[in-house]
Amino acid sequence: MMTGSVSGSAVKKRHPVDQMLPWPRLLTLGVQHVLVMYANAVAAPLILGAAMHLDQAHIAMLINADLFACGIATLIQTIGFGPFGIRLPVIMGVTGLCIPPMLAMAATPGVGLQGIYGAALVGGLFGLAIVPLIGRMLRFFPALVTGSIIMMIGISLMRIGINWAAGGIGAADYGSFHHISAAVVVLLTILLLVRFARGFLSHVAVMAGLLMGYMLTILRGDVDFSGLAAEPWMRVVTPLQFGMPSFHLIPCLTMCLLVTITFIEATGMFMALGSVVGKPVSDEDIRRGLRADGLGTVIGAVFNTFPYVSYSQNVGMVGITGVFSRYVCVASGGIMLALGLVPKLAFIVATIPYSVLGGAAFIMFGMVAATGIKILATVDYRTEHNAMLVVALSVGLGVIPLVAPDFFRMLPAAWRPVVADPIVLTAVSAVLLNAFFSRATRLRQTKTEQRFMAVPFAAPEHPSEPVRL
């Protein structure tokens, strides 16, 4: 007699990416992700606000709008709505690649913030338009190429983490024992918890390290809460609060180029994340993820913030904690929405010193580089004869902007978005070198086959006679 129950073997076990965790654990892990990305997320409004001489109230509005839009974009990317969202544990934030060009736009007469928002709107719409072409591009990104790119993403992020640990670029006491000791406390706390803690405590090792470092800096008197009382409890984020966007040809074209470049980076990041969580990423998955990136940039322009991209540093967080549930990042998106609406909370998180963030960055950013190395380990270097050369040269070119920032300073300004960014330079080099050597290999194979087919074949008259070619 049939029963309404389903046998255990017939029930498909949910992939860890789609598992829902208990709410207390979900929120704690979500806060951890937000703490990791927060410094980069607020960097763009702080830098652009200072460069444009905005007052503190307007800079605060930029930060709140930025966090609010980050939350919306993260929810779209992780939950998924129709053709939008890769449905993996991804955090969205402002791309640092766009900050230098946006500073140049801000300094251009007649452009200003409205021109930046117009360029971001055009760039986001352009990104949505080119997503269908991305699937055809994936054949140019085998493990050899993606591994090189992801390794360089980790290496370039390490530069940021090192500067954070020293107090942040521009700090008067950059590199002092004061800053480095705080970073060391964070790093040691994380390592000890990862090594000796069990269960939930090991999963929140990064947040525990950040809290330990934060408490140390508070006791030292390094954290300034003087502006907290002036911040309101609630501020509603409204679209177009800085006015209607304006459109200018060069800024719009520049933003379209930058969106294309960030799509290349995001493609590599999605593949890396799929490798970390053990869930293969299909062409359609990547297209959904890139649509969410493009839509996030459009949302940023509407809310008068900046272009958004999937953050690679949080891939390292996923690898460290071993928690693959995308609902953790859904919780992070909700937390960012709250931070955007409650300025006092955002202010407190913003007081975490760079040195504290730097201690955690050593591990998280290094994990991204290790993921690239892991992918490169899957390459068969015996059959792909020039694979070592592709890795060596693409990574070697990629480190040029890191070790010699003025190396390309005499080149035309139009080339800067490509040659001044280590990730983009590595990506372009790896793709071109791999295509070049793959084509050369195919040509050699084709000529060998043609030569073999052209040789007459004589069958032996007797079985004992050898085959004559």
Image (cartoon, rainbow, N blue to C red):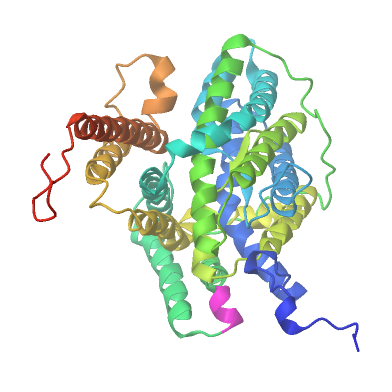
Quadrant in the picture for residue 33 = bottom right
Residue at point 72%, 53% (across, down): 336
Query: Outermost residue, left direction?
Result: 465
Residue at 42% of width from left, 60% of height from top? Answer: 367
Residue 105 part of the magenta segment: no
Percent across and percent down for residue 409 are 31, 21
Q: Please, is residue 362 above or below residue 186 in the view?
A: above
Q: Is residue 234 left or right of residue 57?
A: right
The image quadrant that residue 184 belongs to is: bottom left
Span highlighted in magenta in the image = 199-204
- Residue 352 at x, y percent in the picture: 56, 58
For image coordinates 38% across by 49% down, the residue present is 147
Task: State the residue in front, 309 or 163.
Answer: 309
Q: Which of these two is toward me, 180 or 96?
A: 96
Query: Which quadrant holds the N terminus?
Result: bottom right
As drawn, which residue projects farthest toward the front?
Answer: 461
How many marks on residues?
0
Q: Is residue 171 above or below residue 380?
A: above
Side of 384 where 249 appears, left or right = right
Outermost bottom residue:
1
Which secondary structure type mostly characterizes the magenta part of the structure?
Answer: helix
Work out whether residue 262 can be spotted.
no
Kindly tell me whether residue 194 is visible in this rendering.
Answer: yes
**Residue 339 falls left or right of residue 408:** right
Q: Quadrant of the C terminus?
A: top left
Foreground: 106 or 218?
106
User: Quick check: 31 above or below 66?
Assistant: below
Q: Position of residue 16 (x, y in %)?
A: 64, 69
Q: Residue at x 27, y 29 (%)?
A: 443
